[in-house]
Image (cartoon, grey):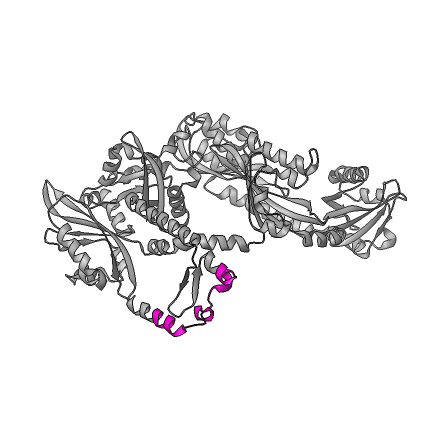
């Protein structure tokens, strides 16, 4: 099994790893060399100078110098960055690390790890322009981006606010939203915002909310905004809200004009004269039920009598409530009796359209939509779905919002030993709770699904006979058309066989152990729950933890992540775990079965009793073995390189600040004289903006001795 596992890694590892002997001759190349270089392993084996020939000409000198120093009998680990030329002529940038291999104290060669960092290199070159682009984007966005603290005091608004309201954004910092929008205590919007804050603080509900806000400007003009808001949490504490406000005044005015029409005109129309208790129908209504106009009595009582007995009271009460409230709308689905005696599903939308002088409703207009075919189709789909659920090998459990079981499929009975009749009305905790999970585990689960999100995870449960089993559980909330949670659906997959298979995979063969243990990269093999089933010696040495203690631990947790202690459940359940880049990369590979490369993961790790900040360059790859899937995780410690990069970026920011603050005009041009950028002094000199100057030619602004200026540019171009 060990040889099989290492062979899997060799065939699927994303990095190009090779081994040279004491003479510098290549003894082994991982299969990924073909993807890196586009040469086959056969072509590489036939060329003894392959490692030199493939290096880009301008980098061969430093590569050869590195080889002279590194490929000797010493215990140092060396790093080098150089370029290679692929078979098709592509140029790639490689991060190279090599380390000596000793067997029984004898030097037998070096193991090298090559990683494609072409993409990261391009990112480093473009990072210097990101700030400028961000500022440009913010100036061009028409919507207002905003941020307030937990008490609705403004912390930030984007430049679009000043364009719409005519008030400088800086003047709003620290002001209360209620004061700005004239939201008074007790009105609907005030109550909504307070309730929203209360839901976050007391119930932990963190979903987005969208609402409309009216604002009257200084000229008395009413402006409507559609606001999308999301709470900001830190360590489970509310620290504020962020969102976007969009001007929807034009849309609002249009919808107001068409509100009555869009609410009622869909199919057959009726007009109810409340005072005279008479109803007028259009031809489509009679046709829908199969009557002619003289066969159907035009009264409210007759309409109610044609509604199915199970729906009648609900519909009648809704109409009476609408009349009592003197405003509003109603919408219901119910069955109506046709002339032939059959029942037809209809949807009725109605609203009050006229009132008397005292404000009492006098007329209701409603539309009936024939939805019988859709309802029948839904029933057929439900029947098909029910058959599929009964036939699936995975357990399916449907509960109400309190967790009481309403349905289980045969697979559940087969797995747990409980029949459908034994399970109905019971709570899963009364049937299958093994006691292996603590209260905090279930609290986290319920908090997730109560917020409308899907929860996934492994859980140990108990069968009717008392035996325990491991299952992968997925719980999904079911919502009605109003967004309210009405049920939970749990899908359970028995993991017992998979666990036994994973145990077999842990019997690692030692034949290829030296190669991976000598790699400078931290290599580990993870199961579908992100738990380690194998790790190389570099990993165990870095962590200072024996391999036996690493097995079955979560990938992030075993690296000493300080967030592991933030939850009694450990790694994966802390408040910041969902944003962990490493965790996201592992989950993406599991979901898509695609490799994720070039992930820079910053982590505060507890190592040797001290907390230190590390930066890793991570790669995840998916490995399929039989019916089981695994993730190959490679971590390269680039902490020192990252520190140097940050220093470079800080130097650039300082230089950029100096250029902008310089009293003399400074301009950047290309070899043809086109302006690519300038500072504020240069803009003030020409009395225009940088936007107007970009891509114009510098010679346009020079009126004397243009020839000398052109010669100077030409000379500089040649020298560079």
Which residue is depicted at the point 80% across and 50% down?
Answer: 339
The secondary structure making up most of the magenta span is: helix
**Residue 513 visible in the displayed image:** yes
Q: Is residue 706 magenta?
A: yes
Name the foreground residue: 400 vs 351: 351
Quadrant in the rendering for residue 31: bottom left
Q: Position of residue 627 (x, y in %)?
A: 35, 46
Q: Residue furthest bottom?
A: 707
Q: Nearer the viewer, residue 321 or 689?
A: 689
The reply, left or right, for residue 174 in relation to residue 7 is: right
Looking at the image, can residue 625 be seen?
Answer: no
Q: Position of residue 675 (x, y in %)?
A: 43, 65
In this view, 457 is above or below 703: above
Which stretch did the figure color magenta? 684-713
Relative to 713, does residue 212 appear above or below in the rendering?
above
Q: Magenta stretch containing residue 266, yes or no?
A: no
Q: Which residue lies at the image location 16% right of the left edge and 63% below the top edge? A: 46
Quadrant for the N terminus, please.
top left
Residue 86, how many percent across, how many down? Answer: 26, 63
Among all residues in the image, which is located at the extreme front? Answer: 704
Classify residue 107 as left or right of residue 660: left
Residue at 43% from the left image edge and 63% from the top image edge: 676
């Amino acid at each position: 099994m060990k040889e099989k596992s290492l062979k899997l890694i060799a065939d699927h590892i994303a990095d190009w790893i090779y081994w040279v002997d004491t003479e510098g001759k290549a003894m082994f190349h991982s299969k990924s060399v073909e993807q890196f270089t586009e040469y086959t392993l056969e072509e590489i084996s036939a060329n003894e100078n392959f490692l030199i020939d493939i290096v880009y000409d301008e980098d061969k000198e430093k590569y050869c110098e590195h080889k002279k120093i590194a490929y000797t009998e010493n215990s140092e680990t060396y790093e080098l960055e150089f370029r290679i030329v692929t078979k098709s002529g592509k140029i790639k940038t490689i991060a190279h690390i090599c380390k000596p291999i000793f067997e029984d104290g004898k030097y037998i060669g070096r193991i090298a790890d090559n990683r494609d960092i072409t993409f990261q290199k391009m990112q480093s070159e473009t990072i210097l322009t990101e700030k400028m682009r961000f500022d440009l984007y913010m100036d061009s966005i028409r919507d207002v981006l905003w941020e307030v603290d937990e008490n609705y005091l403004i912390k930030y608004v984007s430049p679009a606010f000043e364009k719409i309201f005519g008030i400088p954004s800086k003047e709003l910092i620290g002001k209360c939203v209620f004061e700005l929008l004239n939201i008074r205590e007790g009105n609907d919007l005030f109550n909504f915002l307070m309730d929203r804050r209360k839901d976050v603080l007391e119930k932990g509900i963190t979903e987005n909310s969208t609402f409309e806000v009216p604002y009257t400007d200084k000229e008395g003009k009413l402006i409507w905004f559609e606001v999308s808001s999301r709470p900001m949490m830190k360590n489970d504490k509310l620290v504020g809200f962020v969102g976007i406000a969009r001007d929807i005044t034009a849309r609002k005015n249009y919808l107001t004009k068409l509100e009555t029409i869009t609410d009622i005109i869909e199919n057959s129309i009726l007009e109810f004269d409340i005072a005279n208790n008479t109803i007028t129908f259009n031809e489509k209504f009679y046709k829908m039920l199969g009557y002619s106009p003289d066969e159907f009595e035009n009264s409210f009582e007759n309409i109610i009598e044609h509604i199915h007995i199970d729906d009648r009271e609900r519909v009648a009460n809704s109409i009476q409530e609408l009349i009592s409230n003197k405003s509003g709308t109603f919408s219901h689905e119910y069955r109506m009796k046709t002339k032939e005696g059959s029942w037809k599903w209809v949807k009725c939308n109605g609203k009050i359209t006229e009132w008397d002088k005292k404000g009492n409703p006098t007329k209701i207009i409603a539309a009936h939509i024939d939805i019988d075919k859709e309802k029948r189709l839904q029933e057929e789909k439900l029947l098909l779905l029910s058959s599929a659920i009964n036939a699936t090998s995975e357990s399916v459990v449907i509960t109400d919002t309190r967790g009481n079981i309403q349905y289980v499929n045969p697979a559940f009975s087969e797995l747990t030993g409980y029949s459908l009749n034994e399970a109905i009305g019971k709570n899963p905790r009364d049937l299958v709770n093994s006691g292996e999970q603590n209260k905090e585990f279930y609290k986290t689960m319920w908090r997730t699904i109560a917020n409308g999100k899907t929860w996934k995870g492994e859980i140990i449960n108990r069968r009717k006979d008392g035996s325990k089993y491991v299952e992968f559980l997925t719980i999904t909330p079911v919502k009605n058309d109003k967004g309210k949670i009405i049920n939970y659906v749990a899908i359970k997959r028995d993991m017992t066989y998979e666990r036994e298979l994973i145990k077999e995979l842990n019997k690692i063969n030692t034949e290829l152990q030296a190669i991976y243990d000598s790699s400078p990269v931290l290599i580990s093999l993870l199961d579908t729950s992100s738990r380690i089933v194998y790790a190389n010696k570099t990993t165990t040495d870095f962590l200072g933890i024996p391999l036996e203690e690493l097995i079955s631990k979560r990938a992030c947790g075993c690296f000493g992540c300080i967030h592991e202690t933030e939850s009694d459940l450990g790694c994966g359940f802390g408040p910041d775990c969902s944003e962990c880049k490493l965790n996201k990369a592992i989950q993406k590979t599991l979901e898509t079965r695609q490799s994720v490369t070039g992930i820079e993961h910053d982590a505060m790790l507890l190592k040797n009793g001290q907390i230190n900040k590390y930066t890793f360059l991570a790669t995840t790859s998916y490995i399929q073995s039989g019916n089981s899937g695994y993730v190959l995780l490679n971590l390269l410690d680039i902490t020192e390189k990252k520190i140097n990069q940050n220093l470079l970026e800080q130097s650039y920011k300082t230089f950029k600040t100096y250029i902008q603050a310089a009293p003399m005009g400074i301009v950047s041009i290309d070899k043809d004289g086109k302006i690519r950028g300038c500072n504020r002094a240069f803009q003030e000199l020409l009395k225009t903006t940088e936007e107007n100057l970009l891509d114009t030619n510098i010679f346009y602004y020079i009126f004397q001795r243009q020839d000398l200026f052109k010669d100077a540019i030409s000379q500089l171009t040649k020298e560079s």
